[in-house]
Structures are given as structure tokens and as C-alpha cells.
Amino acid sequence: MPTQSKRWFGAEMSLISLVMFIVEFVRGAVLVSLLPIYGANSLGLSPDVIGAAISAHYITDTILKIAIGYLLDRFSARLIVQVSLIIALAGVYALQFADVAWMFIGASAVYGIGMSPIWIVCLTKVTEEHRATQMGFLYTIWLFGLGSGPIVCNILLDYSSSLTYLLLVLLSVLACLLSFFMPTQKALTGTTRIPLGRQVAVLKERLVKMKLLLPGMILQTMAASMLIPILPGFAADELGLSGAQYSILLTVGGLFAVAGLIPMGKLSDKLGGGRWFLVIGFGAFAIGLYVLALGLTFWYCLGIAIILGLSYSTILPTWNALLATYVPPKQEGVGWGLLSTFEGVGVMIGPVVGGVLALWGGESAVFWTSAVIFAFIGIFYASLKGIGAKS
């Protein structure tokens, strides 16, 4: 096996990937199922409060991304991951005491603090050659964890909320314990020789080059995160789905997304990537969301879930391979932290926007608005030429 393959699938990357899977499993269960369902059914909170709690999670996650990228360039990745996962565990544990709105939002914000490092650590392992393929591999692990968390959580919540909560706490403890087996060396080597002022100048230069991509970075994450606070309620109230049927839709959509990530990544590498992968993906996503808002039967929704999953797998590898071209060499931690921060701006405001829209115009209005935004993004990228930059 070539040296590059050994490095990519070696023991270190396998351990980090396992930790990331557990972390994202818990995150998906908390954000997509536990917070919306527990907040609405047990605490009687309105959609705007639930949206604010989810936004608080992403605000702390996003604000820390650039700082964590800077620290990963200078300190042991194991130390950074350990501290953050302990804080994340504290946030999950505090949810059981969050019986009022401000505590509910605060616990979610604390939980968000611990979510940034593991993803950025994984991104710094991506090599120059076959970027989209490797991004597809990472996103397969990430998406499988993020998607399976809500599915398992939805099923368990039908039987016991305390058992569901205990599982999430125990998995958070397991992630903390596994982080102690990570290597102690810095995430990156040679980065400390570059003065901070020079790093800032280079990053500023890259941001100027990618200025046409920045609106899309924010809008696409905002449009997607708008749906998070209202998904369980929309499935039950507008579509008339049971918990089991909702889990089936999540499972099918997730499986098709996971199954398509690596093939789409390889196809993007083979064809040289390009904006048309993004245009097709965003366009299909917009159509799927618009049709889903019409309130069709379960079997129609199942077909839409397949389309949405495949659209997701078309977008992700190409988009992140494109972003990778803007990350300066030997500044991967800071570079990915900065780009993730810009993407996180949309995630910060999306749940609040979605919650307010649902409160004023109903849950279907959130889907229609999200579909319009994705359609606009697809048209916008179709009008661009030569997007990308050389490292």
C-alpha cells in the first residue's frame, strides 16, 4: 500500500475518525431530536426558543473555530480535543437540569464549545492529491454519525427519555476516554515558524480571492440549518408521520448520502470538479425541499429523501475540495478554522430564522424559504466561471 494510503487509513486517523463518529452521533441526536422534542414536549418551549438554543450551540462552536485552528498549529491536538470534549460532556450533562428557557439555551451553548476541534483535526490530514475523494471519506464518517444519532434517538425516545439521555452521556464519556489515546505531537509541523502577522496577511489574501464564494458559504449553511428546529414537528404535524416513519426517511436519505459521497468525490476528482457539481446539487436540493413542503404521503417523501441524499453527496466533496484550494500551505489549522467560521455564520443565524418563520408563517414556510435560497445559490454558481484558487 502506498505511503499516502497508510497515512490516511493509519491507526491515528482511524482513532480520530472513531472519536469524530461518536461526537457527531451525539451532536445529531441532541440537535435534531433531543432539543426540539424535549424542548417542545417536555418544557413547552416555542419554536423560536428552540431555534435560539440550537443557534447558541453553533455560535459558540463557530466563534471557537478560528481560535482552535490557531491552537492546533501550536499545541498538542490531544490536549485541545481532550479539553473540548470534557466541556462538551458538561454541556450534555447540564441538559437534564435545563428546566427553564435560559438554562436550556445556556446548556446548548456550553455543549457547542466542545464541537470544533475534532473536525478541524481531520481536515488537516487531507492531502493535496485526490482531495475530493478524501473529503468524501471524511464526510462519510461524519454524515453516518450525524445521521444515525437522530434515528437511534427518535426510536429510544418513544420508549424512555431517561434511557436516551443516559446513552448520550455515556457516549460523550467514551469519546473523552478515547481522546487520551491520541498522539501527543502537534497537529501540524513547521507552522510555528510562520509569524502570526504573516499568517494573517496570507489568509486575508486568500479571502480576497474567494470573495465571490463567501455569500454562498453563509447562505447555504443558513438555508440548511433553518430546518433543524422544525423537522420533527413538521414530520408529525404536516406530513402525519409516526416516529418510525420519520426515522425511516432519515435513514434512507442518510444512506443514499453516505453511499454517494465517495463515488461523487472520485467523479469530481476525475472530471476536475467544477461549479456544475454544485449547480446540479443545489438545484436538486431546492426542488426536493419545495416538493416536500407540499405535504405528500410517506412514499412520495421517501423518494424525495433519496433525491435529497444524493444531492447532498454531490455537493459536499466538491465544495470542500474547492475550499481546500484556499487553505495556505503549513497553515491548515488556522486556514480551516477561518473558513469554518465563515460557514458557521449561516449556521448561527439559520435556526433562529427558521424558528421565527415557523412561528409566523408555519413550518411549511421554512421549507419554501430554504428551497428558494438553495435555488438562488445554484443559479449564482452557474453564473460564475473559473472559481477556485491555486495553493
Image (spheres, helix red, strand yellow):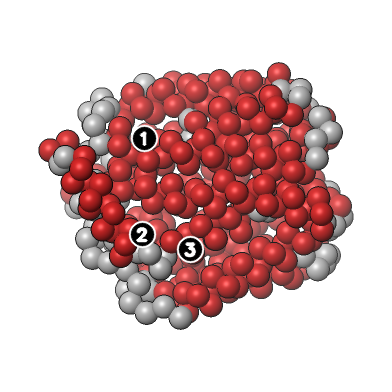
Disc with the residue nearer the chain's start (3 vs 1): 1
Q: Secondary structure at mark 2?
A: helix
* Horizontal relation, residue 171 to residue 388: left or right: right
Dot label at residue 68: 1
**Is 49 displayed left or right of 261 in the figure?**
right
Q: Is residue 80 left or right of residue 294?
A: left
Q: Examine the rendered structure and indicate whether residue 363 appears above or below residue 25.
A: below
Instruction: Report which residue position mark 3 lands on.
Output: 215
The residue sitting at 56% across, 49% down in the picture is 347
For mark 3, does the 10 Å Cα neighbourhood hold few (<14), some (14 to 19), or many (20 or more) residues? some
Upstream in sequence: badge 2 or badge 1: 1
Q: Amino acid at mark 2?
A: Leu
Q: Marks 2 and 3, how far apart in space?
A: 14 Å
Q: Quadrant of residue 155?
A: top right
Query: Is any atom of residue 366 visible in this view?
Result: yes
- The quarter of the picture where residue 25 lies is top right
Q: Quadrant of residue 325?
A: bottom left
Looking at the rendered image, the disc whose residue lies closer to the viewer, 3 or 1, is 3
Pick whichever of labels 2 and 3 is earlier in the sequence: 3
